[in-house]
């Protein structure tokens, strides 16, 4: 079975002295539980794996019992690992984990703890509020082309359509079944179980429609004013911006801000919408493979969105920010910023686009490094493999 780098990172952390709770976080269906199980098998340390998945409303006593048994294991063996999966299902889980972790620290109990769950939003809300200074996050993002090719034999065309969700790989030859999987297990599950449970959403229909609209316009600019018009809603831009942020935290859809822009939530501001994985576009468009890949404009949007999605997958790990830029009819697809360093990145996808803005952008920012994805030096396929170095 293919093993991701995130699994190897989990293993290396589990072989270190006990310092922090390890939290494996990422979008739904990206292999978080599998990565942890592989790490446990390879680490060869006594462990206890417990999941709240089969419990409708897991009581606090369930966590108490699992932690107590793991403590006994640690005392007997001199070291042990406790993995709590779907931990976000337990009400007040973060405070419970904090109390037990602090007790173990005080009593020198050699118990290492790994937390994971399908809802990255609810996990993040818990650990950021209650576990400050006690955790490290290991991110499990959407899979790259290299990973999908190695594990499942994907071609680049497969990747543009079916993206980086390993769970859907076995279904790619049955597109109807694959669509159902994407809609039920990923899109609907993330919206209903994650985003809508994160907080009280006054307009759930608006949030859902924003997601659909945003994915349809992935890799394109769309002002908040136009969004409100297309969504036929009398809401305000602050609500849209907030919902877009929630969708971003859930690993579905984000809005890239214009480099150097101010008042990003105003009606006049124009984020560049971007799906976190090209599979989301295929699932929402529901077009046949031939139309998605055979029509230059459709394929171009898929390519640009896939390149942008890999930037989103890499930005936290490599610590850079992603923007876009436009001035009049001159635009740059993506602007990457790391400290004072800038990269102006253009994607040649075969789609007719506005006049080249690279020269104009570099007049304003002479130190910016130009990069063209889709030329002979940087093929799209190479970029989707994460084989292109960005910042040295």
Image (cartoon, grey):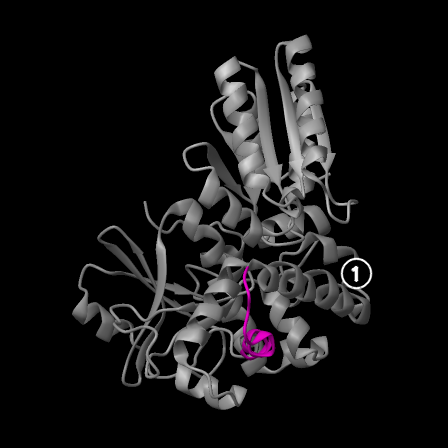
Residue 339 lies left or right of residue 115; in this view the side is: left
State whether residue 149 is above or below residue 58. Answer: below
Left or right side of 327 for 27:
right
**What count of labels does the image hold?**
1
Observer able to see residue 39: no
**Residues in magenta?**
199-213
Q: Helix or strand or loop: what does disc 1 sit on?
A: helix
* Quadrant assignment for the C terminus: top left
Residue 57 percent coordinates (x, y): 73, 47
Tell me if residue 121 can be seen.
yes
Query: Residue 220, located in which quarter of the rendered image?
Result: bottom left
Q: Please tell me which residue lies in front, 251 or 85.
A: 85
Residue at the image point whose x is 77% and y is 68% from the top: 180
Quadrant where the N terminus sits is top right
Residue 97, how many percent across, how many down? 57, 33
Between 356 and 251, the one lying in front of the other is: 251
At 41% across and 59% down in the image, what residue appears? 377
User: Relative to 18, is 192 above or below?
Assistant: below
* Residues packed near mark 1 inside 10 Å, few (<14), some (14 to 19) or many (20 plus): some
Task: Give the main secondary structure, helix, strand or loop, of the magenta stretch.
Answer: helix
- Using the image as rendered, state which of residue 286 and residue 137 is in the foreground: 137
Does 328 lie within the magenta span?
no
Q: Position of residue 104 (x, y in %)?
A: 54, 20
Q: For the point 71% across and 26% down, which residue is it?
A: 48
Q: Position of residue 328 (x, y in %)?
A: 27, 85
Is 201 part of what is drawn in magenta? Answer: yes
The residue labelled by disc 1 is 171
Residue at position x 68%, y 56% from top? 154
Q: Nearer the viewer, residue 242 or 36?
A: 242
Q: Quadrant of residue 203?
A: bottom right
């Amino acid at each position: 079975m293919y093993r991701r780098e995130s699994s190897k990172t989990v293993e290396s952390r589990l072989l270190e002295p006990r310092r922090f709770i390890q939290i494996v976080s990422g979008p739904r269906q990206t292999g978080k539980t599998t990565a942890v199980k592989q790490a446990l098998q390879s680490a060869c340390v006594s462990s206890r794996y417990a999941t709240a998945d089969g419990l409708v409303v897991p009581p606090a006593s369930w966590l108490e019992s699992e932690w107590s048994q793991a403590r006994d294991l640690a005392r007997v063996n001199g070291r042990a690992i406790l993995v709590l999966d779907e931990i976000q299902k337990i009400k007040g889980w973060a405070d419970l984990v904090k109390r037990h972790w602090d007790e173990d620290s005080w009593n020198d109990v050699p118990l290492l703890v790994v937390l994971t769950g399908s809802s990255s939003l609810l996990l993040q809300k818990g650990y950021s509020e209650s576990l400050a200074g006690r955790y490290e996050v290991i991110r499990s993002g959407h899979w790259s082309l290299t990973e999908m090719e190695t594990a499942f034999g994907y071609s680049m065309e497969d990747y543009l359509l079916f993206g980086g969700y390993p769970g859907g790989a076995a279904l790619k030859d049955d597109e109807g079944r694959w669509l159902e999987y994407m809609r039920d297990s990923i899109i609907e599950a993330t919206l209903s179980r994650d985003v809508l449970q994160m907080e009280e959403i006054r307009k759930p229909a608006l949030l859902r429609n924003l997601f659909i609209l945003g994915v349809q316009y992935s890799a394109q600019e769309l002002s908040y004013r136009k969004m409100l018009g297309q969504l036929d809603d009398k809401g305000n831009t602050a609500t849209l911006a907030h919902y877009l942020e929630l969708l971003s935290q859930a690993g579905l859809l984000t809005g890239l801000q214009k480099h150097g822009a101010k008042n990003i939530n105003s009606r006049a501001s124009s984020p560049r919408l971007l799906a976190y994985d090209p599979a989301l576009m295929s699932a929402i468009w529901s077009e046949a493979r031939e139309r998605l890949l055979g029509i230059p404009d459709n394929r171009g949007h898929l390519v640009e969105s896939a390149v942008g999605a890999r930037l989103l997958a890499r930005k936290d790990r490599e610590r850079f920010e992603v923007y876009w830029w436009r001035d009049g009819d001159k635009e740059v697809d993506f602007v990457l910023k790391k400290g004072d360093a800038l990269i102006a990145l253009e994607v040649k996808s075969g789609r007719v686009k506005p006049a080249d803005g690279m020269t104009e952008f570099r007049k304003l920012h002479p130190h910016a490094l130009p990069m063209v994805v889709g030329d002979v030096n940087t093929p799209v396929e190479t970029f989707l493999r994460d084989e292109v170095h960005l910042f040295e």
